[in-house]
Image (spheres, rainbow, N blue to C red):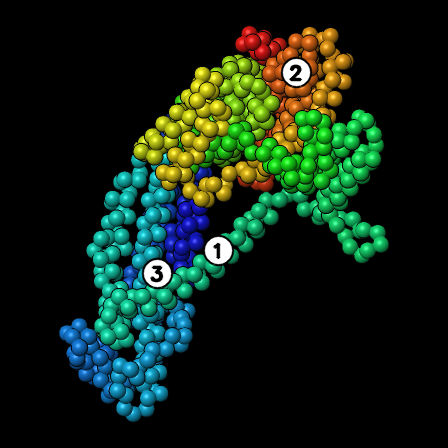
Amino acid sequence: MKFSHSLQFNAVPDWIDKYVAYDHLKKLIFQEEKERVEAANNSQDPEKAHTETESRESVFLHELDMQLEKVFDFYTQKEYELYSSIDQIEATLMANGHLHSTDSPNVRHLQPNALETLDSTYNAPIKVTHEHDKIHSGKRKMSFESRMTIDGDAEINVEALVDLRSQLISLYVSLSELESYIDLNRSAFEKILKKHDKVLESDLRQQYLKKMVLDSRPFMPQTTEALRSQIERVERIYADTFCHGNVPAAVRQMKTHLRDQITYDRNTVWKDMISQERKMLDAHVKDTTPVKTYKLPLINKRITSDLLRRSLCFLFAVIVFAVLLNVDIFSNKNENYCFALLIFSAIMWATEAVPLYATSLLIPFLVVPLGILRNTDGSEMAAKAAAKAVFSSMFSGTIMMLLGGFAIAAALSKYGIAKAFATHVLSRAGTRPRWVLLTIMLVAAFLCMWISNVATPVLCFSLINPILRTLPDNSPVGPCLILGIALASCIGGMTSPISSPQNIVTLQYMNPDPGWGIWFGVALPISIICIFVCWGMLLMVYRPDRASPHLNKVKTTNDPISLSQVYIMAITILTIALWCAESSIQDHIGDTGIIAAIPLFMFFGAGILNKEDLHAFLWSVIVLAQGGMALGNAVTSSGLLQDIAMRIKDGIQDFPPIAILAIFACLLLVFSTFVSHTVAALIIVPIVQQVGQQLPIPHANLLVMGAGLACSAGMGLPVSGYPNMSAIMLESPTGKPYLTTKDFIITGIPVSIVCTVLIITLGYGIMSGVGY
């Protein structure tokens, strides 16, 4: 949670205007940052620029002083009110109260004749700022009769004690809130000064904290000690009056009310925060066109256009499925039914009539009842055996490696290792837009190797926020940087076996497993050349140097290296080293999935990752891959895959392998551009493998790996892969999207074509050289 949200969430609602205006101060810092960048680009007189910088700094300091004065005034007023109330209560109990000790020197009880004095005193309530803090005064009535002998009007006396109890609880809650008020404001000053120094490369924090904040009365150690002693004073009064002097019991009772109040306040504040966030988001939406709806015939009901589209796509898929189930295409029931299932799944995945992972969950249900799977002798597999085979195919070493990759990605992200690496590299890129663009693209591609091209774009977009927020309105630099990250992440999706879901699918159909060494040898030269080509295209289209000669510099993180980070890096390097050496240790480990158990156990077992991190894994991607594997097993077992491969082979068997690779690479380029990289791999890669095996000279691994790399080449539309989907959703502070479909078409399609050509030529040469 951001500190601004944390401040609002933990603040006392009635005091919300009395806290440090953290968001306002942060806006002043960002405004000064933007003005500095504009001044650098305008090349104005250095002396004048220095004067303006000092002027802006004085504005921030003045506002900081105002906030400190506000906190000082409120705390002083509140302290006086609450301390006076405690003095008044204690004076009332002492005066005419006839307190005496019975059980022990620390246990004092009220004499009966003192109750009349209490009753008259508390008829006029003590003024406490938080009237609403007098909570639940009647919910837990004390058994006064068990500890006191009451003479006179018992009802009046009990009411007086209930009022006293309510006053003490109210004071305890208010004093605890005042203690929290000090802590929150101290953190606010520390964090805003830290942000100021980081963003503006200043050294104001230490000086201002020491000379101003920590020297101010609310934040002095003596003040905190005095406040704590007053809280203990209230605890003792409550304990002596209601708990036979048992202070721990008194604290438990009062903390119950404190928890109730905090829960109430936080629930209210949380709802208000959510409401405000929604209002802010709505305010940024420029397209106020209402959602288009259609009225359904025969029934008086309207549905949205999106629901209508998905419903029609689902209906179309079901009709095609039903028709194909009753058409004899392959002269074999198992193959016919499997072909119907394959086309049905392809339509559902391509149109996203339901979420992709939902279609994957439907596949196992359809495979078994349709009787698609066959035994090795060609007979139809029994339902029980078929179900076992389907579930076995859905979890393999490939899925385990995907989980291991997620664990590594989660650890690198959670402990700031990926961000620290990226900021250190970017901080050395200078301020020229062309070099910043190239650096962020190389960083994105490198990070994709370890934390996947699903998570990398989100991280990189956050890294360039200091640049985006200082750009002039409608600057082409913003779209250039964002598009560069998206395209570099698509290219980075081919760099390692765990860098994208389509690579995981590809490995499932490669035998023997290429290992990380061969994969790096093939993929890295292609991806590096593609990134430089993409960089050149972006410079030609957007000309960022002309728009902004100098950009705001990304600041590096100066946090010290922790033992947890060292531990994570050691486990990550060990795991990757074993993956690279998998071919040489295969006799001992059997499968790369076994190695993936190392980071899973070492990170979760050591507490580096927890249950919440496990929940955050991309389970939708895992389920999608499992559904594809179940479908691949069905297509293979039914004989359909071999039949299709034989028919394709008859038309291309006379072609050289490079021509066959070109045909499949172009097919996958088109498919992955319009659908998605992962879906393209799920549907076409199994067919490529069978075709490669059926050739006169088998080249299954060459074609499969080339096809898998080609899946990452499709990047010409916003729907082409996770990075593009993330990029198209980004908006400027004014609510205007940074990118449009036109941006992807102009740059993405040429880069996609170049990337595919490199796979067909350079990739083919390298794969042939390693024996594929």
Q: Pick the residue in front: 582 or 72.
A: 582
Residue holding disc 3: 177
| 3 vs 2, front mark | 2
Position of residue 366 measured from the top left corner of the image (x, y, whole percent): 70, 39
Residue holding disc 1: 270
On the picture, is 501 further left or further right than 162? right
Q: Is residue 366 above or below residue 246?
A: above
Instruction: Say which quarter of the image contains residue 479.
Output: top right
Q: What residue type is labelled 2?
A: Gln
Q: What residue type is labelled 3?
A: Glu
Q: Are marks 1 and 3 in contact (CB under 8 Å)?
A: no
Q: Which residue lies furthest to the left in this view?
A: 105
Which residue occupies 72% across, 36% down? 371
Q: Which residue lies furthest to the bottom in this view?
A: 152
Instruction: Say which quarter of the image contains residue 527.
Output: top right
Q: Which amino acid does label 1 sit on?
A: Trp
> Is residue 445 at least partly visible in the picture?
no
Mark 1 residue crowding within 10 angstroms, few (<14) / some (14–19) / many (20+)? some
Q: Is residue 167 above or below residue 264?
A: below
Q: Is residue 614 above or below residue 246?
A: above
Residue holding disc 2: 693
Circle nearer the N terminus (1, 2): 1
Circle nearer the N terminus (1, 3): 3
